[in-house]
Image (tube, rainbow, N blue to C red):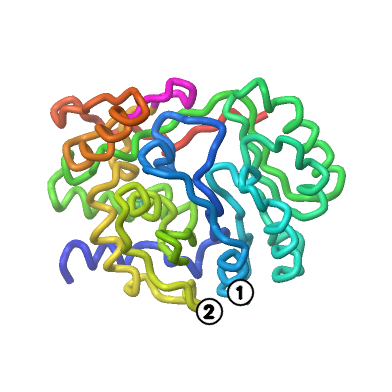
Amino acid sequence: MNLADSAISKMRPPKNMHIICIDVTNKCDLACSNCTRLLENQDAFWEMTPENFRLALQSLKDFHGIIAMIGGNPVMHRQFEELCAIFEEEIPNKFQRGLWTNSIFKHTDLALRTFGTFNLNVHGNPKSERSMQELAKQAVDAGAVVWNYAGHSDHAPLLTAIQDLMSEEEMWQAIPQCDINREWSASIVQNQGELRSYFCEVAAAFDLARNQDRGHAVKPGWWKEEMQAWSDQVKHFCPGCGVAAKQTPYKDFEETDVYTKTNRDLAEKSAKDKKRKIIYLQPENSSMINRRVTQYNTL
Ligand code: SF4
């Protein structure tokens, strides 16, 4: 078995994950450093259609875990209310209906009615702090599962491609240790109008940022595939990704992305179009640190 295939055999397939994400929009009220959705590196706003959201949910029939409605900030989807109604129709178990958000805006009551699981992370934004703490309190009182984070977060870079920083052998040893594959999720996104599935939520972000389409078709039960079925995506995305390279993080509010030469195109695009702060990491200045890809300040 070659190095890549050996690494893939050690990775976690979507069917063994506790959560699968559905990204319903890339709109967000924040612009965090090293965003795990590469939102500042995407060219245009998009929203998943309600019809596609329903198909995405139907494809997850029999999935045992939580289905996370995420973005961007999903409550900024212009049809958020309609999406909530579809979620209730398609997924009867409230605990499986998850909301991942950093600001709830006017939707507290709707969110409490719709979701049984919450991941709330204000990223230190004082404008959303009070309403999110109120939502967290009411959700706990209602018996929901709530992960609630206050304060700022550290975000390690995604654009520091591991292939620019390590030998081939070191790289394929590190990739199966990636925090995202071990602890985060597969995802469904709407890519150029089509529903697409990815073994990794960050891989989906890279595809969207480059306006490419290496996603798999979203057929019922797509998530039951063994890891080998995702080898095309792993071989394409993981060498160009920085998560397993574990480089020095920035605080969310610093709105700064760190990159290496493989991802110069994405970094320079955001610097030019959105005046994003970018920092080039020289390979000789890189060093792995023993921290998670994101570190949250919990309450
Ligand atoms: S694309 Fe990046 S985040 Fe996803 S599994 Fe590969 S190394 Fe990890």
Mark carried by residue 284: none
Mark carried by residue 220: 2
Res 282 → quadrant: top left
Q: Earlier in the sequence, mark 2 or mark 1?
A: 1
Q: Quick check: 240 above or below 231?
A: above
Q: Position of residue 263 (x, y in %)?
A: 23, 40
SS of the residue at dot 1? helix
Magenta span includes 253: yes
- Is 136 placed left or right of 221 in the picture? right
Q: Position of residue 87 (x, y in %)?
A: 70, 63
Q: Position of residue 180 (x, y in %)?
A: 43, 50
Residue shown at the point (34%, 74%) measured from the top left: 229
Q: Residues within 10 Å of mark 1 (few under 14, many from 20)?
A: some
Mark 1 CB within 8 Å of ligand 1: no
Q: Is residue 65 visible?
A: yes
Q: Residues within 10 Å of mark 2 (few under 14, many from 20)?
A: some
Residue highlighted by disc 1? 58
> Given contact means CB atoms under 8 Å apart, are the residues at marks 2 and 1 in contact?
yes
SS of the residue at dot 2? loop
Q: In the rendered structure, which amino acid carries the disc numbered 2?
A: Pro
Range of residues picked out in magenta: 250-257
